[in-house]
Image (spheres, grey):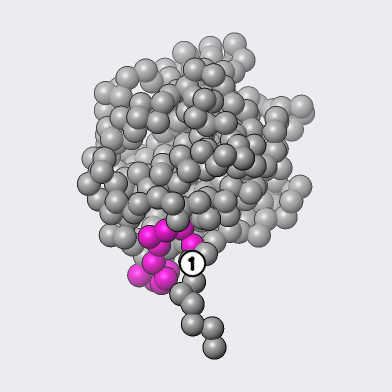
Amino acid sequence: MLKGPFLSKNFIGSIENFDESKIVMLGMPMDSTVSNRPGSRFAPQSIRLESIGIETYSPTFEKDMEDTLFYDAGDLDLPFGNPKRQLDIIKENVDFIYKKGKKVLGIGGEHLVTYGEIEAVCDKFENLAVIQFDAHTDLRDEYLGESLTHSGVMKKIADIIGFENIAQIGIRSGEKREFDMMKKYNTLLKKPEELNRFKDKNIFLTIDLDVLDSSLMRGTGTPEAGGFTYNELLLWLYELRNFNIIGADIVELAPDIDPGKVSTAAACTLIREVLMLL
């Protein structure tokens, strides 16, 4: 009999029992519609491996991951090349998590995974809002003739919950038509205090890691210069500490693009901070 001890295959700080958990970490290794550099399907496993290098305690929120009661469910087995079926599987599993009275922390994967999550939660929460941290508008109706695309995930979500329930932060890239749309519906926020208009909402938080400046976040499929520093992003998240966050995801890490693993390490630390909000 092997005696070990052995390193855990799960994200650091997770508990062993699904039934005892309040939050379920769900890996969604999908990158079927990535428009630039693929590889985000490798993120969930890379994040778990790298998480051994971070501490479970958050000095920002003065809480410990070991007190959050989160369960790492592992990665969904998604059929590569079939985005509709992949989204259906995500929806089915997220639906199950909420029926069990728990919250989801999704780990992508490309940003289109958020659409599957929102399809699952929109029937369970009234007054639902989605707060998006991202470099890109993601408001396209289609890309290269395809309606299911990570370039249009926020447009898909707005079609479900309405633009009045969308907040977009860190946006610095998109078509003129998309920027016109943000201006028309007043979705683009510039200051953390502007979040207060969502204080009475049930909020799903989605963070595309390319919201961070590419000098830190090299490991993403479509990097954009001029983004947030890590501490600037943290200030926005701290503003949300007393909001009702009903679920979240962190997407678009492509770990193999950054062989130094700095991007993956940043993603792990960010996951810790988001857990403090759930």
Decide which of 118, 218 is in the foreground and name it. 218
- Which residue is at 39% across, 67% downward? 15
Q: Which residue position holds label 1?
A: 7
Q: In the visual, does 170 lie left or right of 238?
A: right
- Which residue is at 49% across, 77% downward? 4
- Which residue is at 34% across, 33% downward? 234
- Judge the density around disc 1: few (<14), some (14-19), many (≥20) Cα neighbours within 10 Å: few
For residue 69, what is the image quadrant? Answer: bottom left
Type of the residue with mark 1:
Leu
The image shows residue 107, relative to residue 182, as above or below, that is below
The image shows residue 49, relative to residue 238, as above or below, that is below
Q: Residue 68: percent from the left, percent from the top?
A: 31, 57
Determine if residue 92 is in view.
no
**Stretch of the chain drawn in magenta:** 10-20
Main SS class of the magenta portion in the image: loop
Secondary structure under tag 1 reads loop
Decide which of 248, 4 is in the foreground and name it. 4
- Which residue is at 49% across, 29% downward? 216
Decide which of 67, 160 is in the foreground and name it. 67
Q: Residue 35: percent from the left, percent from the top?
A: 70, 31
Q: Residue 41: percent from the left, percent from the top?
A: 64, 47
For residue 204, what is the image quadrant? Answer: top left
